[in-house]
Amino acid sequence: MRTEWRSIGIPPEASLREAMAAVDRGRFGIALVVDADGRLLGTVTDGDLRRALLRGVALDARADQVMNRAFVAVRQEVTNPDVLELMRAHSVKQIPVLDAEGRMAGLYFLPDLAEPSTRPNWAVIMAGGEGRRLHPLTAETPKPMLPVRDRPLLENTVALLVKHGFRTLFISVGYRAEQIEKHFGDGRRFGCQITYLREERPLGTGGALSLLPERPSAPLVVLNGDLLTDLDLSALMDYHAKAGCAATQCVREYVLQVPFGVVRCEEGRVIETEEKPLQRLLINAGIYVISPQLLSLVPANQGLTMPDLLGLARHEGFDVAAFPIREQWIDIGRPDDYEWVCNNWATEKDE
């Protein structure tokens, strides 16, 4: 049990932004909403925050508007095996410890109680594209092999997957495939097993899934190979499991400011003029979790994008959940993107 919990404690009037900071600061995936006497009023988990963002809850909203009041907690005399069983029964990774008056006394955190486990889930990284928009940088080098922080972009993605327990990785390759295969080999040097899905012709971000040797037994993570992110993949997998959907698509908020006054009319009459309004859109982040049954929708050796695959899934009656990314994320599609990453990513990560 961890007795130092105050770094993740926040008052009920704290903002959602402050709750996010507490979750990130503690690295436990939770913030504790407590009163002035240390009594636990509710919890705010990483998942609670992401669901609030999807609902459009403002970052300056109070934390007690989104907190979970029906939290699971234990008393100080409980044993570690009982806590572990309770975590598994409720599918949680954190359980607060309360004294007889309901005041915080500590926090149980799953990694402290259980040995790190290898995930049964496979991961597929789509790295077969030519990266034409990045020419001339990609004239001799595939985009996933462009250096970022003194190692290839793709190596950052592999390291992120391994960090979160993924050990069986597949990389779809096409353009300059030999450079990727030579660098990563069978993956042992990076703490995983890597198998290559070789595209004889471009199959798109979804079509390459038809090259998998067999259908996996657990949900599959699919990532574009031109991304750089520190996304909490463990939180993503938990979110997908709790959503109960056939697929989960990661999304990112994109804010666009209209440079003009926008006029709203009804029946030829001006109702309102809004000066330079902001439009908040959710864009595709190029990271997905799909259940094994969706692979039956992927045609053999035919081009297919992941958005098209999810469209087919919805047409067949499958539900697709949205997972908002609030961590660092960038799609390196243009020379300006790559230049920004080279000049800024290391600085941000080291702050």
Image (cartoon, rainbow, N blue to C red):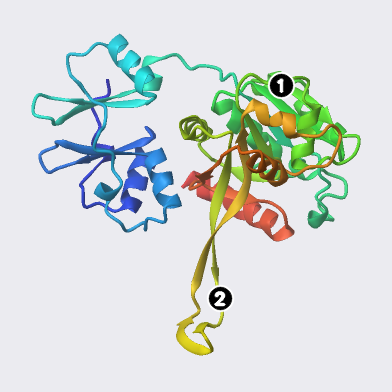
Residue for badge 2 = 258
In percent of width and height, residue 158 lies at 65, 31
- Residue at the image position 87 percent from the left and 32 percent from the top: 178
Q: Quadrant of residue 126?
A: top right
Q: Nearer the viewer, residue 10 or 205?
A: 205
Amino acid type, callout 2: Val
Q: As rendered, which of 298 and 318 lies closer to the eye?
A: 318
Tell me, yes or no, if residue 151 can be seen here: no
- Left or right: 185, with 120 as reference point: right
- Horizontally, is 75 left or right of 320 in the view? left
For disc 1, the neighbor class at 10 Å (few under 14, some 14 to 19, many from 20) is: some
User: What SS does tag 1 mark?
Assistant: loop
Judge whether 143 appears above or below 57 on screen.
above
The disc, 1 or 2, on the residue closer to the chain's N-terminal end is 1
Q: Which x, y percent locates residue 168?
A: 67, 21
Q: Residue at x 68, y 34 (%)?
A: 155
State the residue position of label 1.
Answer: 215
User: Outermost residue toward the bottom?
Assistant: 269
Residue 228 location, x and y as percent? 62, 44
User: Label 2: how many residues lie within 10 Å, few (<14), some (14-19) or many (20+)?
Assistant: few
Q: What residue is drawn where x is 66% and y is 38%?
A: 316
Q: Is residue 212 left or right of residue 87?
A: right
Q: How many marks?
A: 2
Image location of residue 29, percent across then percent down: 38, 35
Q: Residue furthest right?
A: 200
Q: Is residue 267 visible?
A: yes
Marks 1 & 2, CB-CB < 8 Å contact: no
Which residue type does callout 1 highlight? Arg
